[in-house]
Image (spheres, grey):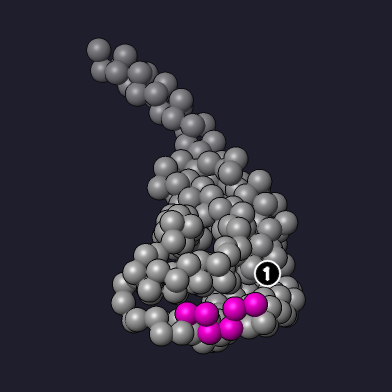
Amino acid sequence: MRRHSTIIIAVLAFGLVPAQALATSSNSASTHAYIQANFALARQAVSRIGATQASVVSYRQRLSHECSRVGAGSPQNEAAQKLSLEAAGALWSLTFGRDAKAIHAFVGAVKPLRWSSSKLTAIAHGYATSLGELAALPTPDLCGDVRAWSASGFQTVPASTIAFDQRVEATEGHTSIPARLLAPYVQSADKSVLERTKQLEAKLEHTEFETGFDDWASLLDTLALPQ
């Protein structure tokens, strides 16, 4: 009886080892592909910072000619915040739209990837989906929407503003895979790529929080909307 049990355990163990090895190999392969795709995306985004900033400046100048201070007299309330969010979304549409080609390549590379951890897979796919939606975000008619709000005596937020804001808010909350979750599956050859990606992303974050905020504040000032 003991001999039979030993044989059964040995057979089961033999069957588990290949399965575990396959899972580890799959995790490492997916991690490698994700790291390479994320690096390519970050590198492209950094290389286009100057061009993206130029498009933002051009957009603000155009609005200054078409509807300068169209929101003058607007109250600083919850309704005004909806127009302010629309302004932020307009800038995102320019920023991510500029990187649409690189984002589509990233989405195409990441969507097929799978890890044994459903959480890790969900984070990767959620991030790719979010970026894809941001890249497809249309530039709203800010002049028209602020004019309509002003014409209502600042009482009625346009339906187009509400719909656009909802679309923007739906894209938020998804981030890239935290390094600590990738760490167990990172190959030695990918460690330097991961570090370079981290540096590029830090530069992008600085641009987003510093330059991006200034661009948003300037756009609100152009439209005479409160922050």
Q: Is residue 216 visible?
A: no
Name the one closer to the observer, 143 or 42. 143
Name the one closer to the observer, 199 or 227. 227
Is label 1 in a helix, a strand or a loop? helix
Image location of residue 81, percent across then percent down? 38, 73
Relative side of 73 to 62, left or right: left
Q: Please, what is the dominant secondary structure of the magenta stretch?
A: loop
Q: Is residue 7 above or below residue 221?
A: above
Q: Which residue is drawn at 46% across and 84% down?
A: 72
**Residue stretch rendered in magenta on the structure:** 66-71
Q: Is residue 46 above or below residue 110?
A: below
**Amino acid at circle 1:** Ala
Q: In this view, does 212 lie above or below 192?
A: below
Of the 4 image quadrants, the one containing the N terminus is: top left
* Residue ID for mark 1: 45
Q: In this view, does 48 lie above or below 156?
A: below
Image location of residue 171, percent across then percent down? 47, 57
Name the one closer to the observer, 192 or 125. 125
Image location of residue 110, percent across then percent down? 60, 48
Relative side of 67 to 45, left or right: left
Image-quadrant location for residue 212: bottom right
Image location of residue 54, percent across then percent down? 72, 80
Q: Which residue is drawn at 34% across and 81% down?
A: 76
Name the one closer to the observer, 37 or 221. 221
Of the 4 image quadrants, the one containing the C terminus is: bottom left
Relative side of 153 to 190, left or right: left
Verify whether residue 46 appears in magenta: no
Q: Residue at x 71, y 75 (%)?
A: 55
Q: Residue at x 63, y 83 (%)?
A: 64
Q: Is residue 121 visible?
A: yes
Relative side of 25 to 97, left or right: left
